[in-house]
Image (tube, rainbow, N blue to C red):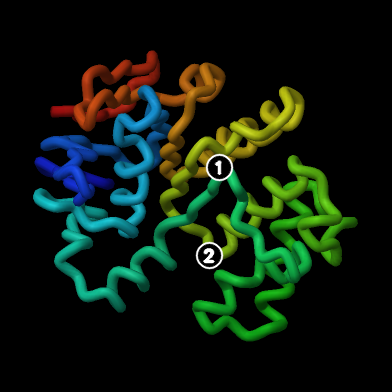
Amino acid sequence: MITLEQVTKHYRHRQGEVVGLNGIDLTINSGEFISLTGPSGSGKSTLLLMLGTMMSPTAGRVLVDDTSVYDLCVARRTQLRRSKIGFVFQTFNLIPYLTALQNVQLPLTLTGKPIPAQVSRASELLERVGLAERMDHKPSELSIGQQQRVALARTLANDPEIILADEPTGNLDPDTRTQILEFFEEFNREGKTVVIVTHDPAVAEMAHRTVRIVEGHIVHADMASQNTAVSVA
């Protein structure tokens, strides 16, 4: 479970201080599928980075499984992120000079797994996303949709409990978008918590709950028909 308690984020700007998030309370239960929506600059991506232990709040607490993550030292916070959280970005963030297989191996390398185990796990995941014949291709040799599937495979490398995605369908054609959304739905059915920042109505429709953020505030939270226990303060 992820809990935000009165989370506020202020940014310094040459013309003064900008409020990114303003006193947000939010609970995301294990196994939920959440979409975060709202206008550009509303605080969605800031919230996602905070959930992912990559941006500390100015005030308030972020708890993952009852652990206040920003009270941890940097090393322990990094360890928690590597073991529990996977990220998917709109720009994929693949290393251009590495093959698909090597890109998926990266998180496994950071955890110190033996190379044969890395190759086996990365190969298994690339097969799962339909890229068994593309493992030795570099990102420039892959289509946009194939690059996104490599990014998905990399996200799953350490079997994270939580998957955070920032506009993962933004650059995709309709057919590829549908395919990628089906993967997220599949991951969620397997018990993973999924949180997606999106402007895509299809994502909001498949999510258990849509949380709308405007000017750093949660202004609306739609509950799905599923009997999912949630809390938004």
Residue type beneath disc 2: Asn
For this rendering, which residue is in front, 137 or 163?
137
The disc placed on residue 209 is: none
Label 2 belongs to which residue? 158
Q: Residue at x 52, y 36 (%)?
A: 167
Residue at 40 percent of width and 25 percent of height: 208
Q: Is residue 50 above or below residue 228?
A: below
Residue 149 % position (x, y):
70, 47
Q: How would you rate the neighbour count of disc 1 (Cα within 10 Å): few for under 14, some for 14-19, many for 20 or more?
A: some
In the rendered view of the protein, which quadrant contains the C terminus?
top left
Q: Earlier in the sequence, mark 1 or mark 2?
A: 2
Corner quadrant of residue 174: top right
Q: x%, y% of residue 125?
A: 70, 57
Q: State which quadrant residue 134 falls in.
A: bottom right
- SS category of the residue bearing label 1: helix
Q: Residues within 10 Å of mark 2 (few under 14, many from 20)?
A: many
Task: Tell me: residue 201, above or below residue 167.
Answer: above
In the image, is 158 to the left or to the right of 18?
A: right
Q: Which sits in the foreground, 60 or 58?
A: 58
In the picture as drawn, the residue positioned furthest to the front comes out as 15
The part of the image, by quadrant, that contains residue 221 is top left
Q: Nearer the viewer, residue 61 or 228?
A: 61
**Percent x, y of residue 144:** 75, 43
What residue is shown with label 1?
187
Horizontal placement of 9 versus 190: left or right? left
Q: Amino acid at mark 1?
A: Phe
Secondary structure under tag 2 reads loop
- Residue at image x 36%, y 23%? 38
- Please give the name of the residue rendered at 72% of the width and 64% of the height, measured from the top-left corner: 96
Can you give x and y, in whole percent of width and height, for residue 232 in the image?
19, 28
